[in-house]
Each structure stands twice: as structure tokens, then as C-alpha cells.
Image: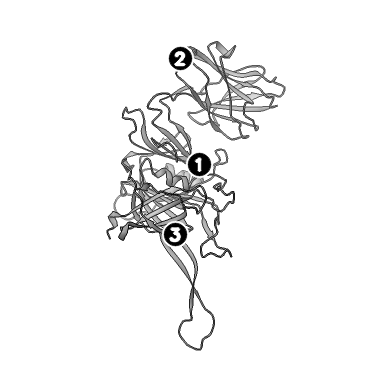
Amino acid sequence: MQAERGHVAYKKETTWGTVAEPATKVWTMTNEGIIQNIEEILSKASRGILDEPHSYQGLKTFGGPVGVEVHPDNFGDILRSAISAPVSNWAAASIVVLETCETAWVADTGCIAILDNNDYKTGSGSAKIYIPAGIAAGANIATKDFVAVDMTADDQIKLWIKCSVNTALGDFKFLLDEQAACAVPDILVDIDALTAGVWKEVTLTLPDMSAEDAVISIGIEMDVDKGECILWIDDIRRIDTASAAAATAKDHVFTPSQEDFADADTVKRCPLYPYTIEVHKDQAADEAFQFTGAIVNTLNIKFGTEDKIVNAVAGILAQNVNRITKTANAFPTTNPYVWAQAVISFGAGYVTNNYLENVEINIDNKIIGVPSLNNSYVIRKFYRSAPRTVNINFVTDFVDQTEYDIFVAGTEQKMRIIFTGAAIVGDLTFFNTFTLYFPKFRYITYPITNPGKGRLTVAVTGKAKYCPTEEFSHQFTLRNCTASY
């Protein structure tokens, strides 16, 4: 048997523990350690001898690490289990900022519009609109004029929006007009439901835009009286998704859920999205081990000046195992991400930090198995034994005390890592990208020590904390040509 001939293949399950075949997709495995453990139960009965008493088989558990190189396409299946199923959308052939919201809008019908430099999503400000009680439903509340823009090829609008009160779909509408101040709006699109006090990035599907070749104003209309409230708007982008390039590239956004995997039999037995995993070890007759009900409980991602290819270790837990004849499968043809493709930034303005040298990210879902009296030697379900955690550690060159002062102050800040790989469609418009975003990163230790010689570096530890305004602690995005996960 030869280790190099082995592979780890997989297929997603719709019902936890029910075999999904064939496992045609393959992870770019560097090492694998999924094993079966069988508990030994020792008899306590005295038999008049001094030797260890009889033993019996107890609980059977299955799991272990799978090391992989992080490639643009198949890594999404690992993220699907470790984080959650993604929201996938076609990448845009053209994303153009229509309105930065870096200046105040013009208020209408008794409202007040100002620039908010304290609460925003991009740049240094957002458009803030005070809406008093008694504003009639159907009224414009604020508008913004600009130089004429041809929007005939656009089919979506994407913007950040927040309201101080809960709203339903269509309570507010987004307006476009070829007249100033949206006098008689040409286009009206319902805005999504909003949770009070939470920023939300919404994507609005536009109707036929073939006549909109000179749009000069945008606005917000309130169609349901929400009483006294405040609305914030930021970073409005117009999007064309109709080109061949856009139909090839897709963005898959993985956001941790507060809910569990919805099992097809409606019984919540598994918190994470499961797979059937096939592990081939180059055995006689092409035999493979087939692990069912497998999940990614822990995920370690590591890269840097020492680990130059981005590597991950998926900590697998499974419910059961069978032995089968291996299935035919195809290995990925893309290149893995490498250390030099990373751009790391901190803070609200995403200031690039060029001093980090080695980074390690650890996600732990804290899942354990639960056995029961059900005539079986394997577990009945998985459950969360504790809150999930995201630890982020890195080594940084100690060039100044900027980040150290943030550690001392206990300040939480945004952290973002973007890997940009090869072009997807060959026209240098779309690239394979992997974005890791943490809205609230907190330093835990910042141990400045002097080794007595050489360069001063610091081995920093930190955590990604849950952010109430964004409703997650971490969010990963893959842009690639994979249709779905």
C-alpha cells in the first residue's frame, strides 16, 4: 500500500447518517487521521484470579483530522459544515458605486437628513435620516441628486441600510428617477425587512431598465407609517450581472447560523451540515472506508512566511463507518492559495497591516456525540456542548506600539484577510478570492519580550467575538466558478 495513492472524497447528506453516494468530489488532502475508537468495558466481577477481568465492547466513535491545501473550489464544502450553508449569488460583471453617502442627503416632508460620521459601513460616514411621527405613508423622506448615469445595463442595486425600528418587506422603497429629487420616480423597489438597530446589506432586483439612460436622483419612500424612527443608508452600488463573466463567477458567503442543520426527517440530531466521507488507503480490491454522518467540528487555517501554502485541518466527527469499493472521482485542477496573496487589514477603515508574518485561525464548534439505549453501539446524535469559539493567533514584527495600545485599551476592531488567486474567466475581471472577515477582533495577549538578540517579534493571541450589529462573529466568502455548495 502507498499513502500517495490515497484520497478523501465526499458527498453531502440530506439526512444525517444516511449514505450519500457516489462520493465524487475530492479534498486536496495532505494527511488524514480519521479512525475508529472502540471503548473497552471491564467487568467488575471477582473471578478468584489476579488477572484483569473480562472486557466487552462499548461505544464506537469515529473521527480525526484531515489536512488539506486550501483551493478556491472544494474548500467551500469544508466551510459549509464548519460554518453553515452559504448564500450564493452571481458575481457582478460591473460593480460601480452610485452613491458613497459621504455627504448629507436632502430631506423631504418634515424629515431631517444629516451626515453621520460615527455610524457607517464604508468610508467615513453614512446618510442619516430622522423621520418624525406623523409622516404620511407613501411620502419621500430623503433624496440625493447627482450627474446623469446610464443604468440601462444594470439589474441590481446593493446597499447597506439600518433602521432604529423593525421593518417588514416593502415598508420602505428605493427610488430611481431621471428627474431631480425623485419628483416622479421611474423605478420603485421594495427594501428588505430590517431588524431594529442592525445594519443589513440588501440586494434589490431592478425591473426593466432599458429606458433609464440618464438617472439623476435616488431616494427613499416610506410606504408604511413607522412612527418616529431613524434610517441610515451607506455605500449604494449599481450592478450588472448579465455578462458572460458574471455568469461564470459566483460569490458564496458563509455566515455562522444560530440554528441547526434542518434534517430531512425533521429531528434535530446534528447541529452542522453532514457529509458521507470516503477514505481510500490504497488497499486491496480498491477498498475504502465510508464514514457516514460526518461533520467538520473544528477547523484550523494556517499560513505565513513559514507555511507558504495556505493549509487547513478539518477535525472530523462521524456517526458510523462501512467498507465499500472506492468510487471514481476527479481531483481539483485549481492552484491553492499562497501566503503572498494575502492582504490583512484592521479597523473600521480597513487599514492594511504589512507586519504580520504567520497567522493561525481556529474555529471550534464544541460538538460531542450522545449515545442512548437504542440497540446500537454508535451515537444517536450530535449536540453543542458549549458556545463555539474562534481563536486568531499571529506573529507580528514589533515595529511600533499601535496595536499594543489597542490591546491595552481592550478595544475590539474589525479584521479582514483577503486572498486573491488566479483569474476565473481569463479576462482579468474576476479572480478566485477567499475573504475572511471578523467584525470584532479582540487581543487576548500581546507578550512583548526581548530574546536578547535578533529581531523583536510578538506571538499575539486573540479572539473573534460575536458582533450584535452584524449578528455573527466570523464570515468567510469564496469567489469562484462553483455553482453551489
SS label for mark 2: loop
Q: Is residue 429 left or right of residue 213?
A: left
Q: CA distance from mark 3 to mark 2?
A: 59 Å
Question: Badge 3, how many Cα within 10 Å: few under 14, some, many 20+?
Answer: many
Viewer-proximal residue, 98 or 127?
98
> Which residue position is annotated with label 1?
255
The disc at residue 321 is 3
Amino acid on which disc 1 is placed: Thr
Amino acid on which disc 2 is placed: Asp
Viewer-proximal residue, 19 or 276?
19
In percent of the image, x 53 and y 64: which residue is there?
A: 376
Q: CA distance from mark 2 to mark 1?
A: 34 Å
Amino acid on which disc 3 is placed: Val
Would residue 134 be seen by someone viewing this image from the given angle?
Answer: yes
Q: How is the image coloured?
A: one colour
Q: Earlier in the sequence, mark 3 or mark 1?
A: 1
SS label for mark 1: loop
Q: Label 1 near label 3: C-beta < 8 Å?
A: no
The disc at residue 150 is 2
Check the picture and name the quadrant holding the C terminus.
Answer: top left
